[in-house]
């Protein structure tokens, strides 16, 4: 397992950063797809900018919830391997 407080803090930091990175990559993809979807709404006489902002806020809130879940999943389900020199390697689920 983890030997020192420093390694524990580093493990938690890496788990959090991995979750944020994963969530943010998906968020950027969602926003790019949303842009194309919202453009078609102007044909139904809706304001595309307003629709984009409304949907983007919902998407952001979902991403924050997903990041919280990923942090917990990363911390609870990751495999920690110790190398012979004392360094740890983390394998995420």
Image (spheres, rainbow, N blue to C red):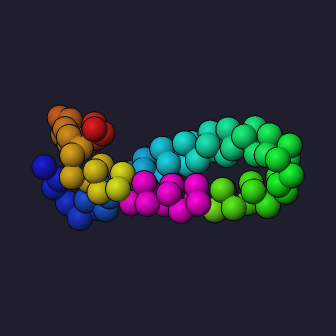
Quadrant of the rendered structure where residue 71 is? bottom left
Asked whether, in this view, residue 56 is left or right of residue 18, the answer is right
Span highlighted in magenta in the image: 58-68
Q: Residue at x 61, y 43 (%)?
A: 30
- Which sits in the foreground, 15 or 85? 15
Q: Residue at x 56, y 42 (%)?
A: 25
In the rendered view, would you say 11 is above or below 86? below
Q: Position of residue 34 (x, y in %)?
A: 69, 44
Q: Residue furthest left?
A: 1
Q: Residue at x 67, y 38 (%)?
A: 33
Q: Position of residue 45 (x, y in %)?
A: 86, 52
Q: Is residue 10 visible?
A: no
Quadrant of the rendered structure where residue 5 is? bottom left
Count of numbered marks = 0
Q: Is residue 8 visible?
A: yes
Asked whether residue 60 is drawn in magenta, I would say yes
State whether the magenta stretch is mostly helix, strand or loop. helix
Asked whether, in this view, residue 3 is left or right of residue 67, the answer is left
In the rendered view, would you say 4 is above or below 77? below
Q: Residue at x 16, y 55 (%)?
A: 3
Asked whether residue 4 is drawn in magenta, I would say no
The image quadrant where one finds the C terminus is top left
Asked whether, in this view, residue 47 is left or right of residue 92, the answer is right
Asked whether, in this view, residue 63 is left or right of residue 15, the answer is right
Q: Position of residue 46 (x, y in %)?
A: 82, 54
Q: Position of residue 78 (x, y in %)?
A: 24, 44
């Amino acid at each position: 397992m983890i030997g020192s407080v420093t390694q524990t803090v580093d493990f938690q930091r890496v788990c959090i950063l991995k979750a944020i990175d994963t969530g943010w990559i998906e968020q950027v993809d969602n926003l790019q797809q949303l842009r194309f979807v919202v453009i078609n709404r102007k044909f139904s006489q809706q304001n595309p900018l307003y629709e984009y902002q409304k949907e983007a806020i919902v998407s952001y809130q979902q991403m924050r919830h997903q990041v919280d879940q990923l942090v917990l999943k990363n911390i609870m389900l990751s495999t920690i391997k110790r190398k012979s020199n004392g360094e740890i390697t983390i394998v995420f689920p």
